[in-house]
Amino acid sequence: MLSTVVGVILTGMLYVNPRIALSDYPADVRAAVPPRTRKELQLGILIAVPLLLIFVAVPLYSVWQVKQQLGGTLTYATAFTTLFGEFFLVSMYDLVVLDLWMFYSWTPKFLVLPGTEGMADCKDYRPHLKVQLTKGTLLLAILAAVLALVPVYLY
């Protein structure tokens, strides 16, 4: 469910203005278009803040539910595993559905920034795959490790 909600929000954002996600485009695309405007940056923040809250609050709620199902006792390992599992599922949904399928395979017209049509880097998914599976997964593990402290010690 979390993956679907995040996916719908991100797809809607890209449909409204793909330049909001300009930093996620390949380097040659970023170089070929003007930098984001102040309005685009503000809109990106306006979308990112609630998205981040959803991305954190829903998994924390899931861990709270797990704690209730376990009779009020929760180990750090269980909290971490639950959080990391949910974060990783969202990450894989983003990678497989949004990035590999929608961006690299299908590439609807609304994702192609004017002046970047046909650029070779737009079809090279390997750098994106590598970053998401290495640095991205490490960041998710760190976030899960920190957030796992909340349900173990605070509720």
Image (spheres, rainbow, N blue to C red):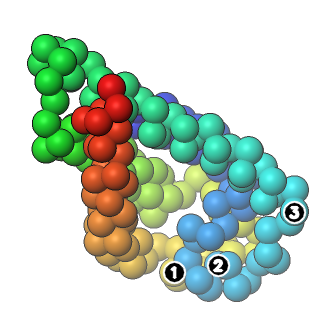
Residue under circle 1?
121
The residue tagged with tag 2: helix, strand or loop?
helix
Badge 3, how many Cα within 10 Å: few under 14, some, many 20+? few
Disc 2 versus disc 3: nearer the observer: 3
Q: Quadrant of the N terminus?
A: top left
Residue under circle 2?
29
Could you tell me residue 155's position as x and y percent?
33, 26
The answer, for residue 137, to whether it is visible in the render is: yes
Badge 1, how many Cα within 10 Å: few under 14, some, many 20+? some
Q: Give the image quarter of residue 128.
A: bottom left
Amino acid identity at mark 2 = Val
Is residue 94 found left or right of 148 in the rendered image? right
Q: Are marks 3 and 1 in contact (CB under 8 Å)?
A: no
The numbered mark, 3 or 1, whose residue comes first in the sequence reads 3
Q: CA distance from mark 2 to mark 3?
A: 19 Å
The structure residue drawn at horizontal position 35% and vertical position 45%, both measured from the top left corner, is: 147
Q: CA distance from mark 1 to mark 2?
A: 8 Å
The residue tagged with tag 3: helix, strand or loop?
helix
The structure residue drawn at horizontal position 73% and vertical position 83%, both measured from the top left corner, is: 32
Mark drawn on residue 38: 3
Amino acid identity at mark 3 = Arg
